[in-house]
Image: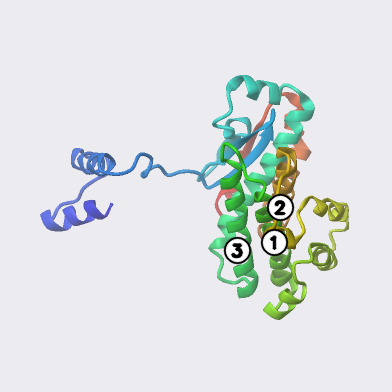
Amino acid sequence: MEALRRYSIEFKTSVILSSSIAAEIFDYFESHSKPGAHHIGSLYESIYFFDADFWTVSIPISFGTVLLDAVESLQDMPETLKQDLILTPKTAWDFILFWADCLDYGMGISDLSKCNNLDPYGYQLLMAADQELRSAVSQLKENRPDSRVLLTCRMATEIFLKAYIALKIGLTEKEAKDLNHDLKKTFDRFLATSGYSELANLRDKLDIFPAIHDRYSELSYPLASLWNGFALAQSIGAVIVREMTGRNTTAQILSSNNSMHGTSFIKLVPSDVSR
């Protein structure tokens, strides 16, 4: 685009994107760049555990009214496995609810990253938690995920909880440090702040994470444990983003119960897609 701009200035002419000169310029840069360097990519990528392996869940960049297919977000999953996933009501339902978390989180965190009216420290924590979560996705996409990804998921969970408290009622850096790395103490503070009593059952699930001092130890966990830790971290992030943005694809799915009737499509109207 910079080359197009300079060409227009030097030759005092307008260049439209569909013109032959624009195509020539784009072809030049594509042929002199790393493969994939010019791909737009996804708005957000997550990971899903199915059939003893991790699969990328891709949330596309969308504008206007769109119809999204949850199963098609599993771009690297073979079609036979997709059929196994979607044709069994239990596995289909579990995946589509997880996909709703991915959709709300990915679009919502994009919304929040552009906000300038949030508590500064809360915003800082939220963006840090997002980085930790995306780092966990990258680690889980490896052919042989390292068990230390659970520490990354633990950190994402801790920072998400502190971010919520800071965004909701305020939290100083000293208060955040006083909570230390005590996940259950921080979670209790989150529950008290949010009033989400229905999430109290998640407290015991925090035991999936290693103790903070285990970061100095060699770790070995089964893939299912890595998945449970990641899913918990993302679900907490999704809860926070939903409240802050008003996005709630899960409610839309539950009200229509589409997945139980053999379809995995969700229609998003403009107000859902770009706020």
Q: Quadrant of residue 197?
A: bottom right
Amino acid type, mark 3: Ala
Amino acid type, mark 1: Phe
- Which quarter of the image is occupied by the C terminus? bottom right
- C-alpha distance separating marks 1 and 2: 8 Å
The answer to whether residue 222 is left or right of residue 71 is right
Name the residue beneath numbered marker 3.
128
- C-alpha distance separating marks 3 and 1: 8 Å
Mark found first going from the N terminus, 3 or 1: 3
Q: Residue furthest left?
A: 11
Mark found first going from the N terminus, 3 or 2: 3
Disc 1 crowd rating (10 Å Cα; few below 14, some 14-19, many 20+) is many
Residue 148 position within the rendered picture, expressed as x and y whole percent measured from the top left? 66, 51
Residue nearest the observer in this picture, 252 or 102: 102
In the rendered image of this protein, does residue 194 appear above or below residue 269?
A: below
Residue nearest the observer in this picture, 37 or 167: 37
Disc 2 crowd rating (10 Å Cα; few below 14, some 14-19, many 20+) is many
Amino acid type, mark 2: Ala
Q: Quadrant of residue 80?
A: top right
Q: Residue furthest top?
A: 80
Name the residue beneath numbered marker 1.
160
Name the residue beneath numbered marker 2.
233
Whether residue 269 can be seen here? no
Proximity of marks 1 and 2: CB atoms separated by less than 8 Å: yes
